[in-house]
Image: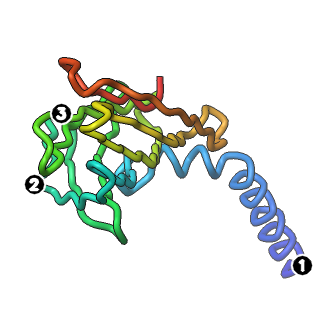
Amino acid sequence: MKKKVLTAVGLFIAAAAVFLCIFGKLLYYRHYPHDRITGDMTVTLNGQAVTLDENDFSFVGKGGFSAYENEGSSRVSIEGGEYGLYSFDIHIPGFAKTVTADIMMYNWWNVTDFKLDIAVDEAQETAEYKYLYTYIAEDGKKLSESGSDTQNIDSDELKVRLGG
């Protein structure tokens, strides 16, 4: 009798382990307990590093938003949790214009991470953006996109879009 119970318990544990190996990532990301959009940003204005704090951002949208300094960069967190576009404005101290960052959530359960570097050069009249954007695919694999863009700072709108 004892041998049958041990065999049944062993088979149950083996089946549970196989189930978690196959479906563990999918379940984890759908029940992720932290902010679903997080990223690090570095900003330079005319070649000088600029430190941003929470007062240099404005966010109007779904979920909570927070920003804080993190080892020389600014760490941004957005609660997320719904499909669609999340936007926040960046007010760079000493620069008259606002930069808008748009981040696309491909699925309600997605977990997105990004790194964004913004370099504003008033003498060259340019704003340059470099980014790395990672997100989770349907099968639980982590995918990434990277890119860069340069805009003239005299344009009406300074905007960078990550994802989509």
Considering every residue shown, the one lying at the far top of the view is: 156
- Foreground tag (1 vs 3): 3
In the image: residue 97, left or right of residue 78 = left
| Residue annotated with mark 1 | 3
Amino acid on which the number 2 mark rests in the picture: Asn
Instruction: Say which element carries label 1.
Output: helix
| Residue annotated with mark 3 | 61
Amino acid on which the number 3 mark rests in the picture: Gly
Q: Position of residue 75 (x, y in %)?
A: 32, 58
Tell me which residue sits at (66%, 36%) in the image: 139
Q: Position of residue 30 (x, y in %)?
A: 48, 43
- Of residue 25 and residue 104, the one placed in the foreground of this image is 104
Mark 3 neighbour density, 10 Å: few (under 14) some (14–19) many (20 or more): few
First-in-chain label (1 vs 3): 1
Q: How many marks?
A: 3
In the image: residue 8, left or right of residue 83 = right
First-in-chain label (1 vs 2): 1
Residue 118, above or below 163: below
In the image: residue 103, left or right of residue 66 = right
| Residue annotated with mark 2 | 55
